[in-house]
Amino acid sequence: MIKSIPDFLKIQKYIFYSDRINNQGELILRIGRPNNGDCCPKCGSRKLHIHSHGTWRKKKHGNFQKNQIYLEVKRKRLKCTCCQKVFSQKLPGISEYARKTNNFEEQSLDHLATNSFNETGHVNKTSYSTLKNQLYKYVNPHKLSLRKLELLGSQNEIYLGVDGQSFRGIEMVLTITEVKLKETITVLPSENKAELEIFLQKWPEELRLKVKGISIDMTNKQKKCLEKYFPNALIVVDHYHLVQHAIRLMHKTRTLIQTVSHVLIPIKKEMDKNIESLTDKEKQKLIKYFLLYPELKQAYLFKERIRSLYRVSKINKATHKLKILKQELFASDNGYMNDLAKTLNNWEVEILNYFVCRITNAYTEGIHTKCKLIKRKSYGFRNVQTYVRKLLLGLFPLIFIISSHTF
């Protein structure tokens, strides 16, 4: 048990001298380095003697059950007997002039990955600026994305998911994932084409050619840029966004009828549901209002037909069904259904690409749910660079981030 304590406290390379607890309940461990553990940085000789002993200094090392742990250590000055070089002793895990150990920084990052700056600072008795500096020191989006691209190099085929998420209001960041491996590649601080191009230019040519499919939404912001850099990839519209677009237009139809008729049509919840998920009571409620307003029934059935389109197994059958659906939508007297037909017409190739390359942005949307939780726990962010780094800290394993820091 006693032998395992240095492993638990991560002080294996030190000699343990004593411990004490001060008036604030802080545990202070006095440790030291063996005299034969260093070599001369100039000639490499191990024939050294102590030039000066230095003074005992406290270094923040971590916390355990809300109690702070400090290391009390001397940094000796050593002199080489061969070349007479005088130098400071190296302390493993403690940078020169630092008032905290590497273990403390890693522990702080681990806590910050799932908690706010305020809560992490309260637990570790650290200021916001110190935590922010640690975040910027260890989480480098450029280095992390390069490491991810290295890992993707071993794959024969790559399938990307590209989708935006809100940073603050209409300001967006862009998430890029590998949807089949379920790996986050990076989060870009903007949806701008220039920002995306800077990132894609880092990709080696042979890696770009391995990308066979890219799932996107229907904003059309990144489509041309992605086609330029990934010539072998099929651009696929994520069917979740298409169905959601149909639902929005369906509810616009309901809202318009309510406004014109001056009546309340309380079936939003029921119309959102898939037809196979409706209970008998919900079906009766829908039938009641569909008889009164046939336009609502038409809009709901069009939405369900778009859903059923994705259950088709062959592209030829899907092409035929989509053609008929567009014709009926264009023939509708409902202007919103005409708009839906135009959307299907504009994105026909990308919609049908799904039946060749069956990928979706489901994993990317799941990442966005986690990002929203991180943002909510932190009560929002004002700086987009801090937000991106905080997201990457929460999305990537800490060991991957630490190894990328030394990469």
Image (cartoon, grey):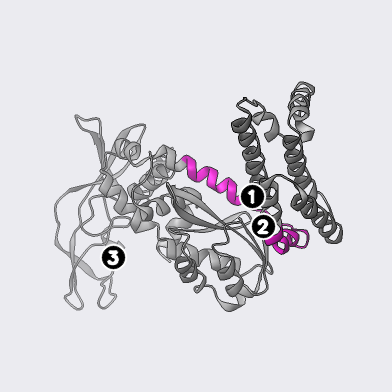
Would you say 387 lies left or right of 295 here?
A: left
Q: CB of mark 1 within 8 Å of CB of mark 3? A: no
Whole-number angstrom distance, CA of label 3 to CA of label 2: 60 Å
Write down the residue under mark 2.
237
Disc 1 + disc 2, Cβ < 8 Å: yes
Answer above or below: position of 99 versus 376.
below
Residue 362 within the magenta-colored segment of the rendering = yes
The 10 Å Cα crowd at callout 1, few under 14, some 14 to 19, many 20 or more, is some
Alpha carbon distance from label 1 to label 3: 61 Å
Under mark 1, the amino acid is His
Give the answer, above or below, for where 283 lies relative to 76: above
Residue at 70% from the left image edge and 33% from the top image edge: 271
Residue 281 x/y as whole percent: 76, 21
Name the image quarter holding the C terminus: bottom left
Closer to the camera, 203 or 192?
A: 192
Magenta-drawn segment: 345-373
Residue to which mark 3 is pinned: 38
Task: Give the distance between the C-alpha atoms of the residues marked 1 and 2, in whole angstroms.
Answer: 8 Å
Picture coordinates of residue 219, whole percent (x, y): 57, 57
Report the side of 61 relative to 364 (left or right). left
Provide the secondary structure element on which disc 2 rests: strand
Mark toward the start of the polypeptide (1 vs 3): 3
Q: Secondary structure at mark 3?
A: loop
- Is label 1 in a helix, a strand or a loop? helix
Task: Determine which residue is flagged by label 1.
Answer: 241
Q: Is residue 33 left or right of residue 347?
A: left
Asked whether residue 251 appears in the rendered view, the answer is yes
Query: Which circle's residue, 3 or 2, is located before the other in the chain?
Result: 3
